[in-house]
Image: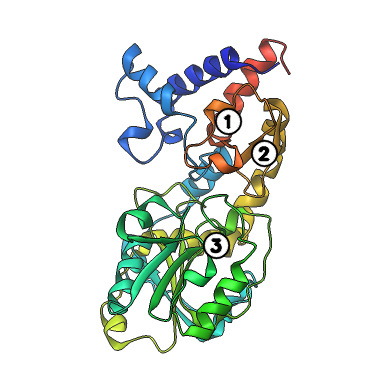
């Protein structure tokens, strides 16, 4: 039986392993132990299970390390409109122009500034940083008004699921002339499909690399702008070409769904060991009723009782060996 005591033993093993394999730690200081002292390791153990981020599984790190980076070539790189590599989600990609982006938040600020005479809105349950910069949160479609401007994630952040009313939202925005920014950061990790309709209102599509690959400290990805691209954007694009380079290369070399598909076996393995149901997003598991680890779910996802599988992906070999030695698996 996988209980709290075993869970904490594994978390201590993972936290200690991060000290000797730093490539398995996160991009930021709070995602690693500050030292090998008991206090610092304990602080890391306390937060190790929280949050959803890009996997640092060995096969992902090995592929990233295999790339030969030429910083001059990356600086001069032009992101081309290779729309055939992207999934058919209902958006008419040929109507957009693709650029490298520094990060999603820059694009959101730019989008909101362009529509500064409108009232920015998000639905409750969006990314925490959207909640910090956008005051008005709504719950129902009829709260979208003619003077609104909407930022929305696809899949939606709160449940890491496609909103069932997504097409109704887009229909209302199209009918009222409300511009929309669509954030697709979770799209390459989900098995759920929902083909969008009424997409004329979608003015900007952001696609960060940071849930696909462990590059949160670098950020970047692609941004799709409805044509024609304004002349000021052509001369002063908000570039982040290193992240865009990695996103381009993994799609070109491995295919758009590689990260999702290459983790499915790990997801089923650890959901089986932890007695979790699988989720559409590959690095998440779902607690069954009365699960002994329910209090250790990923924060801000309580409505779906989600559990982050990332630590077990990152330390799969270590945790598997320990459980086998103990005769648990």
Point 34% across, 48% down: residue: 217
Name the spot of residue 203 as percent of width and height, x first. Answer: 45, 79
170 relative to 20, above or below: below
Q: What's the CA distance linking mark 1 and mark 2?
A: 9 Å
Local secondary structure at mark 1: helix
Q: Residues within 10 Å of mark 1 (few under 14, many from 20)?
A: many
Mark toward the start of the polypeptide (3 vs 1) = 3
How far apart are labels 3 and 2 at the CA level? 21 Å
Q: Is residue 225 left or right of residue 303?
A: left
Kindly identify the residue that appears in the image at 46 percent across and 73 percent down: 144
- What residue is shown at x 51% (from left), y 36% (from top)? 298
Q: Secondary structure at mark 2?
A: helix
Give the number of the mark in front: 3 or 1.
3
| Residue to which mark 3 is pinned | 154
Where is residue 88, by image quadrant? bottom right
User: In this picture, is 229 found above or below 250?
Assistant: below
- Label number found at residue 202: none
Furthest residue to the front? 142
Q: 69 or 33, which lies in front?
A: 33
Question: Residue 13's x, y, as percent?
Answer: 50, 18
Badge 3 or badge 2: first in the primary sequence: 3
**Residue bearing the label numbered 2:** 267
Q: Can you tell which mark lies on residue 312?
A: 1
Label total for image: 3
Q: Relative to residue 66, is residue 119 depicted above or below?
A: below
């Amino acid at each position: 039986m996988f209980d709290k005591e075993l869970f904490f033993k594994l978390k201590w093993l993972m936290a200690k392993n991060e000290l000797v394999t730093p490539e398995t730690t996160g991009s930021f200081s709070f995602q690693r132990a500050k030292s090998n002292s008991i206090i610092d390791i304990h602080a890391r153990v306390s937060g190790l299970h929280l949050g959803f981020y890009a996997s640092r599984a060995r096969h992902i790190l090995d592929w990233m390390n295999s790339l030969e980076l030429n910083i001059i070539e990356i600086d001069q790189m032009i992101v081309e409109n290779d729309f055939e590599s992207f999934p058919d989600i209902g958006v008419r990609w040929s109507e957009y122009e693709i650029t490298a982006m520094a990060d999603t938040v820059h694009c959101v600020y730019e989008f909101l500034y362009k529509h500064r005479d409108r009232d920015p809105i998000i639905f409750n349950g969006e990314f925490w940083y959207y909640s910090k910069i956008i005051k008005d949160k709504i719950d129902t479609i009829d709260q979208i008004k003619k003077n609104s401007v909407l930022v929305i994630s696809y899949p939606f952040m709160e449940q890491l699921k496609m909103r069932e009313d997504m097409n109704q939202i887009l229909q209302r925005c199209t009918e009222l002339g409300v511009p929309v920014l669509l954030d697709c950061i979770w799209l390459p990790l989900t098995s759920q499909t929902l083909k969008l309709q009424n997409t004329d209102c979608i003015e900007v599509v952001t696609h960060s690399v940071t849930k696909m690959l462990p590059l949160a400290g670098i950020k970047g990805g692609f941004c799709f702008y409805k044509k024609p691209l304004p002349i000021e954007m052509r001369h002063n694009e908000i570039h982040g070409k290193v992240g865009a380079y990695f996103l381009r290369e993994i799609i070109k070399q491995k295919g758009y769904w590689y990260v999702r598909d290459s983790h499915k076996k790990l997801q089923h393995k650890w959901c089986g060991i932890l007695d979790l149901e699988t989720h559409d997003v590959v690095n998440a598991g779902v607690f069954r009723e009365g699960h002994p680890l329910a209090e250790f779910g990923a924060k801000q996802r309580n409505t779906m009782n989600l559990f982050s599988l990332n630590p077990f992906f990152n330390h799969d070999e270590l945790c598997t060996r320990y459980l086998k030695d103990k005769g648990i698996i």
